[in-house]
Image (tube, grey):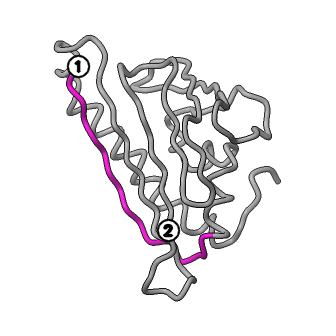
Amino acid sequence: MRKHVLRREQRLNAPLEDVFPFFADAGNLQRITPPEVGFQIDTPLPIEMRVGALIDYRLRLFGVPFRWRTEITEWDPPRGFVDEQVRGPYALWRHEHRFAPDPASDGGATIMIDEVHYALPLSPLGEIALPIVRRQLDRIFDFRAQAVPEMVKSKTPTRA
């Protein structure tokens, strides 16, 4: 199984005490995912985020619908958390979410780091799809990079 890493770092103009709760609310995940992915959370909201919490989703990748289940395997508020795929399209999916006050901002900004370790199924044949999968993951994380700053800044609630 060949492992890959996607890493993104972003400075958010909001203090850690505003940023972490936004990401700790699983309901916000749908809001920061591109609409064409058709992302829906099947687990009833609100979800108590903690080690062992299971979250079920439905989405479409390249037009193909599938179900995905992740488990929160690390929970360290407000510094971060980790979700790992239990069932889904990848042979491996481990998404680390890390947050820290931006030392240059005197507490008014947060550095957010996403690091995803993943492996494609059907190795080694599945590696043929790597350029397409990488492009889709970049698209999803590019969308998030645009959507998150305004949502965190406005403290927009998950449900209207």
Residue 14 covered by magenta stretch: yes
Q: Residue furthest right?
A: 160
Residue annotated with mark 2:
100
Q: Image check: 3 left or right of 26?
A: left
Number of residue marks: 2
Q: Badge 2 local density, few (<14 within 10 Å), some, or many (20+)? A: some
Residue 13 covered by magenta stretch: yes
Magenta stretch, main secondary structure class: strand
Q: Residue at x 23, y 23 (%)?
A: 129
Q: Quadrant of the N terminus?
A: top left
Q: Residue at x 22, y 14 (%)?
A: 123
Where, by quadrant of the figure, is residue 72 drawn?
Answer: top right
Q: In the rendered view of the protein, which quadrant contains the C terminus?
A: bottom right
Q: Position of residue 11 (x, y in %)?
A: 44, 71
Between discs 2 and 1, the one toward the N terminus:
1
In the picture, the disc for residue 1 is 1
- Give the residues in magenta: 2-16
Q: Amino acid at mark 1?
A: Met
Amino acid on which the number 2 mark rests in the picture: Ala
Q: Position of residue 125 (x, y in %)?
A: 18, 12
Q: Measured from the top left, where is residue 13 in percent x and y?
A: 53, 77
Q: CA distance from mark 2 to mark 1?
A: 32 Å
